[in-house]
Amino acid sequence: MNPTPYPITVTARLDDVSRGLWIVKWILAIPHYLILLVLWASFAVLSVIAFVSILITGRYPRRIFDFNVGVMRWTWRVTYYAYGALGTDRYPPFTLAEVADYPAHLEVVYPERLSRGLVLVKWWLLALPHYVVVAFFVGGGLFAVDATSQDSRPALLGGGLIGLLVLIAAVILLVSSRYPRPIFDLVIGLQRWVIRVAGYAALMTDVYPPFRLDQGCGEDDSMHPATAPDPVAPRGGVAPLVLGGLVLGVATLLGLTAASVLVADRTLPGEDGFLMTPDVTYSSSGHAITSEAVDLGDSSMMGPVDHLLGDAKVTVSPIADEDPLFVGVAPTADVERYLDGVARSTVVAVEVVEGQGTATYRESTGGPPSTPPGDQRIWTDNAQGEGRQSISFPVQSGSWTVVVMNTDGTPGVSAAVQAGATFPAIAWIISGLLFAAGYFLLLGIALLIIGSTSRRGNRSAPNEVAPPSGQDDRTPASA
């Protein structure tokens, strides 16, 4: 038994599309986008007028209704041509009217009467569950923005699941010159769901949109005489196709993460195998600049860290004509004992914008240190003298603090500081991410193949109606 036709009818016919034209369709569609900006601005204003009319009279003004349907129809044709489906290479006509021989159609049955009470709540409260679903489908894109927020700027490029599926279809089309029919059927079903919700939210019907994925080219032909329904109702294979699209999204995310790590490894400042931060200038009117304590836990926690990090490195460079500098690292408890009662600045935050760093300090008042820093025996590693000074030390368990001072312990410390570390596991991290991306890529492709095979099997199952003899199963017959 066929489901009851919904008053908003969305139909489409899959044409033979070229393998590469989709790459430049965003340029070809620019004239339509510019016109649609104006049309959707008018749509928003007229929808407010229609809201008032329905609230007072229970009727949607017919001329406004026809115009708004025309805007949605025009948008659907452009969406179908461009990146909402890529279902045809035939350029969309510049008209609000129905074009019988164009492969994409949208019709809305005019409601003679509408509820004056529902108009107050259906476009925001009642439609809220659908908005959640639509957000997943389109990522806040086509129709959803216009219908829910009355925004006059339509988002014509679909995102979310629809955008991902169309991207997959485009890549397959580029390689094989054939649009995968199961993906097409699913994309049209998702777009149909979105447009039904948009029409309901735009007050064009009181019939609540069904939570039903009606896939394929056509709907009940009694709702749309210009285009016959798909000769075979698509069934089965939906879950593998959806899951396959999501898995391919995970593969893409992992691949981009691997690329980001690789770029960071190649572009961050480095020396002798260390990845270094940009120079940040620190200054204090006290006798020392210290880092906050870096707590690396006990030795039982260091196993994973030891494999990720090798040695740490800190370099300090004096500001012009300043005194020779001392830099050292020591256990935090020893540093606290040495600098107890000493005026110093502790770095609590650093913000780097366009290569320029700004530090935030916690100030401690007091007097000078008891001895110059070089006389202390607390340092795990230290360096002092004129010019650039550098220390390096293995990352190990414990709580550690880095100290920068003048070699004689006098107040007024200024230095340009870089910090970094070696990452011996970075190659393994990149390899692991690429391996995981490849695994999910193959899994996603396998799921798409399973979904496609399942749908073909259902189409040829017993008791199914076969397509009319001689009719291409990619293109439904015209009425």
Image: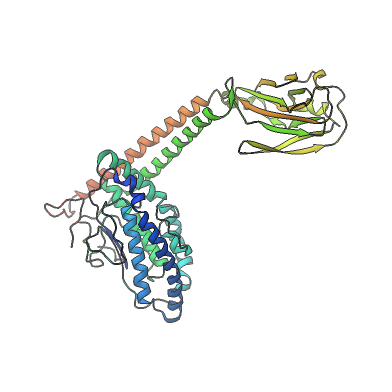
In this view, 70 is above or below 132: below
Res 99 visible:
yes
Res 241 visible:
no
Q: Residue 393 lies in what quarter of the image?
A: top right
Q: Can you say which quadrant of the picture contains the C terminus?
A: bottom left
Image location of residue 203, percent across then percent down: 41, 70
On screen, residue 468 versus residue 49, left or right, reads left
Q: Nearer the viewer, residue 295 or 361?
A: 361
In this view, 17 is above or below 276: below
Q: Nearer the viewer, residue 96 or 363?
A: 96
Image location of residue 299, percent across then percent down: 65, 24
On screen, residue 417 versus residue 135, left or right, reads right
On screen, residue 131 versus residue 210, left or right, reads right
Q: Can you say which quadrant of the picture contains the N terminus?
A: bottom left
Q: Residue furthest bottom?
A: 57
Q: What coloring was used for the rendering?
A: rainbow
Q: Residue 141 lies in what quarter of the image?
A: bottom left
Image location of residue 469, percent across then percent down: 11, 53
Q: Residue furthest front?
A: 321
In this view, 3 is above or below 288: below
In this view, 426 is above or below 93: above
Q: Residue furthest left?
A: 469
How many circles with numbers are drawn on the protein? Answer: 0
Q: Nearer the viewer, residue 462 or 11?
A: 11
Q: For the point 50% across and 31% down, which residue is it?
A: 263
Q: For the point 36% across and 65% down, which residue is it?
A: 71
Image location of residue 375, percent across then percent down: 82, 18
